[in-house]
Amino acid sequence: MRELASKGQLRLAYFRWAIVTVPLILLLGFASGRAAPSGDENAWFMALDKPAIMPPGWAFPVAWSILYILMGLALAIVINARGSRKRVPALIVFGIQLMLNLAWTPVFFGMHLVVPALVIIGALIVLVAITIALFWQVRRTAGLLLLPYLAWICFAFALLFQIHVLNPDAQTLVPSRMTDQIEIR
């Protein structure tokens, strides 16, 4: 039986996809983070009481850069798995969870909405778990690459829940970027 593509050709096709997917997801994540100042650049966030388990500020961009790279690599693997019937559903769920992921930063850091941000992370946990299961069925390595992402957003949910408990009036600490800050008398 003759092969349609050699292993080298398949590997090259994967690398071509990865050259697109990794920078694209990094760029989208960066753009989401710039949509509203986040971390130490955000006066509202700095005014919040933080839980004892809160990592230092530098850990978040490092962690998210690594996670976005892993997501891009996993996505390239699934895109390149053309023979799999599970590929299209996996890509659809991946796209939905990515949109939720990108919406979280403006909701939390821009609008100062802690409870809706908790709901987004809760939905994200479910969608990422489904994405992992679907990616796993397409290519096991793709599912494995998303496990650190699932672990991180579970940790983020715990952090955000503690922030909510420590700051029941969080939305009123500092005006959001979405509100008019001019007072006319």
Image: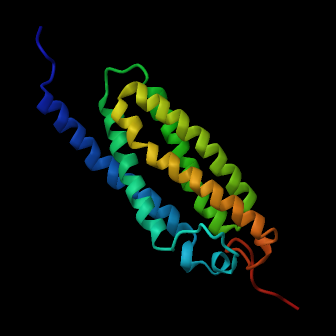
Q: Quadrant of residue 41?
A: bottom right
Is any atom of residue 35 visible in this view? yes
The percent position of residue 61, horizontal first and vertical second, equals 44, 67
The percent position of residue 33, horizontal first and vertical second, equals 51, 66
Q: Quadrant of residue 65?
A: bottom left
**Viewer-side residue, 183 vs 116:** 116
Q: Quadrant of residue 104?
A: bottom right
Is any atom of residue 87 visible in this view? no
For this view, does 79 lie left or right of residue 134?
left
For this view, does 40 lie left or right of residue 166?
left
Vertical comparison of 90 with 185: above or below:
above
Tag count in the figure? 0
Seen at 36% across and 41% down, the residue is: 74
**Viewer-side residue, 128 vs 182:** 128
The percent position of residue 183, horizontal first and vertical second, equals 81, 87
Vertical comparison of 161 with 125: above or below:
below
Q: In what quadrant of the picture does the N terminus appear?
A: top left
Give the residue at the far bottom of this rendering.
185
Seen at 79% across and 75% down, the residue is: 172
Q: In what quadrant of the picture does the C terminus appear?
A: bottom right
Give the residue at the far front of this rendering.
52
**Viewer-side residue, 178 vs 128:** 128
The percent position of residue 117, horizontal first and vertical second, equals 68, 57
Seen at 43% across and 23% down, the residue is: 86
Q: How is the image coloured?
A: rainbow
Give the residue at the far top of this rendering.
1
**Viewer-side residue, 21 vs 44:** 44
